[in-house]
Structure formats: C-alpha cells, structure tokens
Amino acid sequence: MLAGLAAGAVAVLTGSPRTAVRAFAAVGATADVSVQPAPGGADQADSLQAALDNLQAGQRLVLAPGTYVVGHVLAVRGEQVVVSGYGATLVATNPDEQAIMMTGANSTLVGVTLTGIGTQRLESATSTKVAVDGQGIQVLDVKINGGASVGIFVSRGSSIALVGNKVHGTLADGIHITGGSRDVLVQDNAVTATGDDMVGIVSYQRDGVLSQNIYVSGNYLAGNAWGRGVAIVGGADVTVAGNRIEGVQKAAAVLVAQEDGYRTASVANVLVANNIISDDQNATQPGNDRPAAGHAAIDINTGSGTVAQVLVTGNQVTRASFDGFRAMNNVCGVRVSGNRFAAIGGLALSLQYRNCTATQFICDANTLDGVSLVAPPGCSSGGTIPVSGADAGRLPPVRTSLRQGLQASMPARPARSG
C-alpha cells in the first residue's frame, strides 16, 4: 500500500483517534511508518497492533521518543519488518499480556525500552517481555525493566541474534532459550538482578529435540537473587566465552547439567572459555534467605543422564564460597585447563564423577592463588578431549545498520574462542 508513494509523500494511517501514524517514503525505498505517543497516556495497544499488521515486507515502524501505554500483547508477524524505538518506552499494564511476540521471519526489534509489570512469577509466553518463535529474528539494543516472567524468551527459534540488550529485574530468567532453538547468538547483553537464571539454555526431554549451536559471548551478568549465571541444562554445541559473571547469590556462575527433576536432556560439546567470574554464592541481600545450592562456581553435574565433551579453559574464578570447579555423577570427557582460581572456599578442582576413567579427564596448567595445581586423583595431566563448542560460522550476521550509532562498531559474527 505504501511502496507506491512518491518521494516526500506522507500517508496517514487510521488507528486510535489519539495516535498519529504517518509513512515517509524515499526514492527507491519502502516507506517508514512513524508513530507518536498518545496525549494523556491513552492505551495504544490496538493502534500499534494495527500499524504492525499493515507493515509490508522490508518496512520499518518507527516509534517516536516518548511513553506508550500498552494493555495487551503486540504481535510482530510480518516478514523482514523492523520495529525501531530509540527513546520510546512501552509501559505494560497487564502482567499476563505484556509480551512483544516476534514470529515474522527475519524481523527485527531494536532500540525500544519495555517496562514490565508483575509481583508474582508467571510462566506463560504472553507474560514474557519479548517472545521469539521463528527464523532470522533479531532483538537488538532493547532495554527491559521488570516483568512477571522471562525478559527475552526464545522457543523454536533458528538463526537468532540477541545483541546489546539490557534486562533488569525480571521475576524469571533474563534470557531463556529452549524448544529446540538453534544457531543463536547471545552477545554483549547486560542482565542484572533477575529472579532466576540470567541466561538459561534448556532442552526438555518432552521436546524430542535439543537446543543447539548457541554462542554466549561478551555479556555482563550480575546479581541474580536465585538461579545460575549461565545454565546449560540439556543441549549440544554451546560456547560460553568472554563473559563477566559476578554476584550470583545462590548457585553456580556457569552450570552444565542434566536435571531429572525437570526432565531435561543430556548435554554434549560445550566450551566454557575466558570468562571472568567473581563472588559466587557469597553475597548477601536483605530478605534473600534461600539456602545456597552449594554448586561450584563452574559446575558440571547430572541426574540419570550424561554430560560429555566439555572444555573449561582460560577462566578466572575469584571469591567462591564452595568449589572452583566440580564434576559430579555421569560426567565424562572433560578438560580443565589454564584456569586461575583465587580465594576459593572449597576445593579448586572437585572430581566426584562416576562411569568414567582418569584418561577421559584432563587437568592441566591450572593455578590456585597464583600457585600451580597438581592434577588431583582421577584426572590426567595431559591428553586431548575433542570439544569445539558452537560453530560461529552458522550464526547470523548482526543487522548493525539498524542500530542507532553502532553501525560500524559490532562485528558481523563473534570470533571463535578456545
């Protein structure tokens, strides 16, 4: 409808009587659609949804700076559309109807601020702040403050990029990836003060498919009251590299596990490299009287399933109340190499595995408080374990041209680590 407008033409789209929606066309380009905040704080959910539904492939909806009250879910269904809102804040009013549902293939949400609502944790997709279910979707530079559930929820997604987002104060995970999602980049996000895992990667047995090829890099994760920093609970081909993780109050900074209680799948081929981890399970917060899980800062454990092919290398772990690294139960094919541990309350390296042999565990070049660690019983001092982690070549290029002021600052793909 808008593509045929002449250069400089303006089209007014109908919606809420208090909402001005205009399209600005340029020569040879699909027209942008611009939306303004409603005077007096009227609910704009219906008019915003109408504008979203009218977008054509390749078109951009630009939210002008200001505050938008949104009383129900917004669905981004169009293919290759962009929703851009630097300076725009969407304020939710319904705890179970506050998500932006991203299902349109190759669509992008960029720059908006989402203010959540809710005092009781909810589990529905509609109670998340951004729900991603589709192919080629990107969530860039989005700020999330509060919410009854997950900040950014990815289920059944493929070729997904979550880059430069800030998630704070959600009642569940900050970022949660599940449902057999694959080829997902989680890069340069800040996730703080969440009610559960800051980044969770989960594969449930009932799904019949693993979440795989997930790359978690360059993120700042801090201060969650419960849950883990990065949790890989069922999955394959995962890299957790170059992140700063601090102040995880009650559990592991990095967990690689299979959990019977949640009926999650086994895990294979995980690289945990060059992360800076500090103050694990030693922070206090008024009113947070939950007992600590007693995990190591980097913890690998199982129920009845298995964890195999894990490389833990080049990490710095400082001030952990329990062990620095632990492998427990059906864990096999692990190398712990070149890590620096300091001020560890328990053992630097705790090996409690079963159904494996010392030749399939390697511990080399690790230090504790600056002193070289001898490989403990059950661990060989040399050898190789085949671990590659995520394949960065399969990750989507980030759409930096859509990011305000950052077009030249972000690499298209992360560099390989390890």
Image: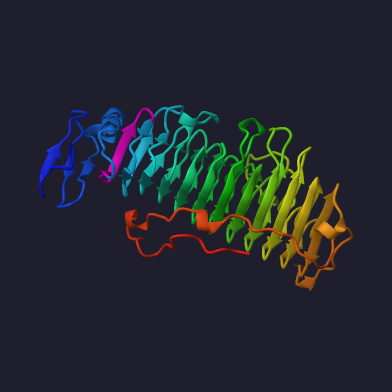
Q: Quadrant of residue 338?
A: bottom right
Q: Position of residue 206 (x, y in %)?
A: 64, 30
Horizontal placement of 390 versus 134: left or right? right
The image quadrant where one finds the C terminus is bottom right
Quadrant placement of the N terminus: top left
Q: Position of residue 278 (x, y in %)?
A: 65, 58
Q: Residue at x 52, y 34 (%)?
A: 149
Where residue 403 sits: x, y (%)? 35, 55
Is 62 covered by the magenta stretch? yes
Q: Is residue 201 magenta?
A: no
Most common SS among magenta residues: strand
> Against 84, is 16 above or below?
above
Most foreground residue, 212 or 46: 212
- Vertical side of 164 occupied by 151: above or below: above
Q: Residue 300, how many percent across, how many down?
A: 74, 49
Range drawn in magenta: 59-73
Colour scheme shown: rainbow
Q: Is residue 397 left or right of residue 11?
A: right
Residue 141 visible in the displayed image: yes
